[in-house]
Image (cartoon, rainbow, N blue to C red):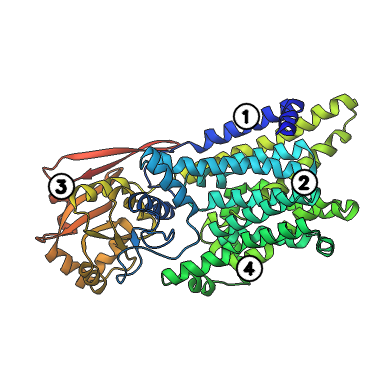
Amino acid sequence: MDKFVADIKKNKKIYAAIFLILLFGMYLRVYHIDYPTIGYHNWKESHYLAESRNFAEDGFFNHGFFVPEWDALRSFDDPTGAHSDTFPVISILIAIAFKIFGPYLWVARLVGIIFSLGTVLMMFLLSRELFKRDDIALIAAALTAINPLFVFFSHNVQLINPGVFFMLSSAYFYVRWRDSDKNSHLISTAVFLSLAGLTKYTFLVIAIPFALTFPYKKLLKLNKSQIKAYSASFVAMLALPAWFLYSKTIVQAEGTALAIGEMNLWAFLTPGWWKSVWPYLSDNYTTIGFFFAIAGIAMLAVFYKSNKKFAELFLLSYAAALIPFIMIMSNKLKGHSYHQFPIAPIIILTMSYFIMVVSQTSPGLFKVKVEKREILKWATILVLFLVLLSPSMDAKNKQFDTQFFGLDIAGDYIRENSEDTEKVMFSGGQSFGFLWTADRKAYYSTDLNLDILKEAEDSGVRWIFMYHWGFVDLQDPVLLQYLEENYAFRQMAYISKGQDNVVYYIIIEKGEGGFSMADLQSWTDGKELRYKDYDLNAGKIKLYYVN
């Protein structure tokens, strides 16, 4: 502790800079902290919010030892929602926060934001420990603070925020152990690596650079205390297979088989794959930033060839881990940008390395006095940072502006007008977000037909929440006739676009019948027209709705 305090006193400007970076990072992340669950990937957010609320309400052992329970039911055979998953770290922590502060969205999102800011700090510490330099440490922290992927998903309630923090903490202690050979650093490496893997298995990718840079000769000269440290580290890692096997025995697991079946090892070699993934890459790191990263990898290889330093070797090994990661995750990566979380740090680190090298060499291109070279170096860093800042903010705003209006309104209506035991059928996709305010169990189908609906009704479904992409199901004449005879309108919402009103969703309830899309206009006549404003970066948009 005394050493840390002394370091702060010695490097006041550096710590002041990291404080300002964290402050700016927090400013970017608290945007929409209490906004409804209607945003980009709300289906994933509603998953972990439901787990958190159910833990808070029913306890952590209702279905076994920390077995999570979601509200979007996958099968008519199991109405509880208990399921096999990685260890629900974020759901447990949010449930504890809910018990202390109440079940509010800002509480849940603040947990993720704290982990995200911790990730900024760990990028600073890891870079500083690797290179023993302050410039690349501040660059890495600043780029992490503004990174669109980390900014947006910091308050999207998911496992990825604690996962990446644990992964980087493991890397930090591994690098420290390489220098110090302290047993505590080795054990900390294993504990955080285990936590990273328990949170989400893909974060184990960091084990590849560990394996490629591990000093194996040390294993031949272990003393008693080191043997104990290795044994403790091994025990810490046993938590991974223990949880995996336990969770599979509690609930039948289809997820693992499904994930293996989705692998396409060589997809990344096709132009189509890159066409699908490129928009995510350009959004998450900006186009110019991604090319900074490519140049950074090339520079790492060149400098390692001449200096043989551990820092360059470690980053090159992490970069090499991209190949097996992409091979295994190719199908996932082209579908959702958050799957890049385990590899985002190496892209940011190589971007930082490029900026460091350019800023270090650029003063030599000008005839300036030695005392002014440091000023020119930091000026170069600032210019390159500003080059990345504007497109990063644009990409961040685009993600925040991807919204699915009305999910919160629909959820409120269903909760207020239904019994706790009544279930909902909904359209899937990005309409999961209604579950947070509805607080009901629900089934979903992207291809609803009468057989599915009948089975759902037998399982307790009384309500249907149909978002606009689900309207295609009404082209099925058999289903449509059944709905017209057995369901009635309860709520509809629309957005005015010029002279047209675009219907966004409908809610219908089983009962007296009378449902007809053709009669939607007449159904709204004489009823109170309400509206809600939703925030976009360019202004507000009104969603009108009628109960």
Nearest to the eye among marks 3 and 1: give it: 1
Tell me if label 1 and label 4 are in contact, CB under 8 Å: no
Give the amino acid type for the residue marked by disc 3 in the picture.
Answer: Thr
Determine contact: label 2, label 4, CB under 8 Å.
no
**Residue 111: x percent and y percent?**
48, 42
List the residue tagged with mark 4: 327
- Single out the mark in the foreground, 2 or 3: 2
**Residue pictured at 39% horizontal, 55% vertical:** 430
Q: Report how far apart the C-alphas of labels 3 and 1 lie in the structure.
A: 53 Å
Instruction: For marks 1 and 4, give the CA distance.
Output: 38 Å
Q: Residues within 10 Å of mark 4 (few under 14, many from 20)?
A: some
Amino acid carrying mark 1 in the image: Leu
Q: Residues within 10 Å of mark 1 (few under 14, many from 20)?
A: few
Q: CA distance from mark 2 to mark 3?
A: 65 Å
> Is tag 2's residue or tag 3's residue first in the polypeptide sequence?
2
Q: Nearer the viewer, mark 1 or mark 2?
A: 2
| In the foreground, 397 or 440 | 440
Q: Which mark is residue 20?
A: 1
Q: Can you tell which quarter of the image residue 526 is in?
A: top left
Rendering coords of residue 379 (x, y %): 75, 30
Q: Quadrant of residue 366?
A: top right
The amino acid marked with disc number 4 is Met
Q: CA distance from mark 2 to mark 4?
A: 28 Å
Task: Tell me which numbered mark, 4 or 3, is placed earlier along the sequence.
Answer: 4
Tell me which label, 1 or 4, sits earlier in the chain. 1
Q: Which residue is mark 3?
A: 524
